[in-house]
Amino acid sequence: MAVEVRYVVTHKGEEKLVTTDKKEADQYDKMLEVGENLADYIKAKGIVIEDGVLEELGIMLSSNKTDVLALLKGKTVEDVLGTETDDD
């Protein structure tokens, strides 16, 4: 019999990720947390977006934080998107 360690990331009661890599689970959990914080910030600033779309937007911004930070530092969309591969 084998023992397997699994890390399960849940968000709002829903399984989002199952992995055997603790670091990957921690990073994914952090990304979801930051995404939720971004969504809350957008909502608090008075921008009205449907909750599902707002959550998706927050997660997208969080999961692309390197690109978002580059844009905030003045890079153009072409600069940021030009460095992506077709898989992104």
Image (cartoon, helix red, strand yellow):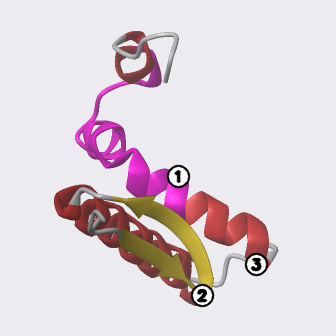
The residue range painted magenta reads 59-78
Q: Quadrant of residue 85?
A: top left
Residue matched to label 3: 51
Front tag of 2 and 1: 2
Residue 6 lies, with reference to residue 85, above or below; the image says: below
Residue matched to label 2: 12
Q: Position of residue 27 (x, y in %)?
A: 26, 61
Q: Position of residue 80 (x, y in %)?
A: 37, 23
How far apart in space, not on screen, are marks 3 and 2 (Cα)? 13 Å
- Dot 3 or dot 2, earlier in sequence: 2
Q: Position of residue 13 (x, y in %)?
A: 61, 89
Residue 84 shows up from this direction: yes
79 horizontally vs 55: left or right: left
> Does the segment drawn in magenta span residue 23?
no
Q: Quadrant of residue 37?
A: bottom left
The disc at residue 60 is 1
The residue type indicated by label 1 comes to Met
